[in-house]
Image (cartoon, rainbow, N blue to C red):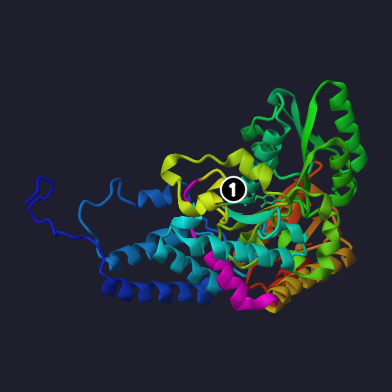
Amino acid sequence: MTSWESEGDRGSYHMSPDEFRRYGHDVVEWVANYMETVSERPVVSTVEPGSIRMKLPAAAPEHPESFEEILRDLDDIVMPGITHWQSPGWFGYFPANTSPPSILGELVSAGLGVQGMLWATSPAATEVEEVVADWLVELLGLPEGWKTTGPGGGVIQMSASDSTHTALVVARERAGVDIGRMVAYASEQAHSSIEKGARVAGFGHTRFVPVDEEFAMRPDALKAAIESDVADGLIPVVVVCAVGTTGTTAVDPVRAVGEIARLHGLWHHVDAAYAGTAMICPEFRHHQNGLDFVDSYTFNPHKWMFTNFDCSLFYVADRAPLLEALSILPPYLLNKATESGQVIDYRDWHVPLGRRFRALKLWFVLRSYGVAGLRHHVREHVALAAGLAEQIEQHPQLELVAPTPFGLVSFRHIDGDIATDALAMEINNSGWAYVTPSKLDGRSFIRVSIGQTNTTAEHVDRLWEMIEASS
Ligand SMILES: *Cc1c(COP(=O)(O)O)cnc(C)c1O
């Protein structure tokens, strides 16, 4: 007996492959059951703060517990505190979809447990990721040069926030001037991740450019802001365009902003976190015209593309400045493949070193749905949103507050904030649907985001009936 072995020590505490097989089947059964019943569950958890914690012991168990006990507590303790993002009545925020092939890809990735920081640490992890990133260049109508076989390339990051932060760091490094004088630009409707990314990247200044009546960035206002900053001795470095803002899915004019960026030597990053998925349908691609004047681009398959979190694509038109900004080669990572210059080492494409095999679930999804399947569901969601928008427009007590280019419907009650807030609360208190109450120019409105994996006409009709009955 070695010193750490106490009396009663079992020698090994690992679950055997046979036990794993048994409990694994139980867990797959559990998840399948969840899929079948999620639509019957109240969408939003209504537990009080601390109530889940109260049911859990303060310390980890000293001795192993049975898997049956663990699964029982999953049902009894955890489930009451779950908000059901996978409910077809989920109209909140944006979707955070999952799907059976994605879950299975995630399971295999966990089973393999590889670290894909270098090509050499698991070649397939890198090469499958390259291939799915290249496939998506075609699928989204992105410039050919953004493929990993060209000067650019795509990489999977954890989130659009990370992708945007990375873009801001590359822009900063490329500019190579005093960061206190550097300015980043985005619209007043830009996602908070732009401001956070600029702060983390150390930008001295961030400007929020005014928007037009459809909440898209005004190029004339961008130009004026740049000129005024230059006159004040500051250095414009980067501008971020949104294709589909979080507030109302407004689309900034990518081409016009790109022309200004080029004229003033700015890095141009596009944040299409949510709406990027729509670009698999050619009819939406006019919203991102002008990508030839874009340096980097991000979109999240983990929102609308039936691929569970985390999975955010980050593309660069030219990977040289990215690698220059982020490559550091310590001696313990030296290897022949890296030295040959013939492989991609994705550790150089973002902040983390270690990286999961996230491409696997995306590969499973793309193959299992096929492009036709993805287009079918995206088009269905967008058509449902258009239908709901039309019903709202024709209702005398309701009004749209923004266009509906994708799956988000933004509207309010004409009686004002109190009536709008009450309507949102009524919907959310119903238990079977959830919408996001929000504010635009200080006035209340309701965001109905249609795009959950299993949302169909039946669910949107039911939502409309409730809106109508309460307006
Ligand atoms: C959701 C969203 C983000 C943030 O995405 P994360 O992956 O959660 O960081 C950024 N920008 C836009 C426009 C979004 O809709």
Q: Quadrant of residue 394?
A: bottom right
Examine the rendered structure and indicate whether residue 102 appears above or below residue 63. below
Q: Nearer the viewer, residue 356 or 325?
A: 325
Q: Where is residue 145 drawn, in percent x and y? A: 75, 58
Examine the rendered structure and indicate whether residue 219 appears above or below residue 360. above
Q: Say which amino acid is labelled 1.
A: Trp
In magenta stretch: residue 360: yes
Look at mark 1 in the image and give the residue it sits on: 349
**Residue at (66% x, 72% y) in the render:** 455
Q: Looking at the image, can residue 288 be seen? A: yes
**Residue at (44% x, 62% y) in the render:** 79
Q: Where is residue 298 drawn, in percent x and y? A: 69, 53
* Magenta stretch, residue numbers: 353-371
Examine the rendered structure and indicate whether residue 144 appears above or below residue 172. below
Q: Nearer the viewer, residue 150 or 89?
A: 150
Q: Where is residue 376 drawn, in percent x and y? A: 72, 77
Q: Is residue 151 left or right of residue 310?
A: right
Dot 1: within a 10 Å radius of its alpha carbon, few (fewer than 14), some, or many (20 or more) residues? many
**Residue at (51% x, 45% y) in the render:** 352
Q: Main secondary structure of the magenta part?
A: helix
Q: Nearer the viewer, residue 246 or 221?
A: 221
Q: Where is residue 224 drawn, in percent x and y? A: 91, 33
| Furthest residue toward right | 220
In magenta stretch: residue 103: no
Q: Is residue 452 left or right of residue 254?
A: left
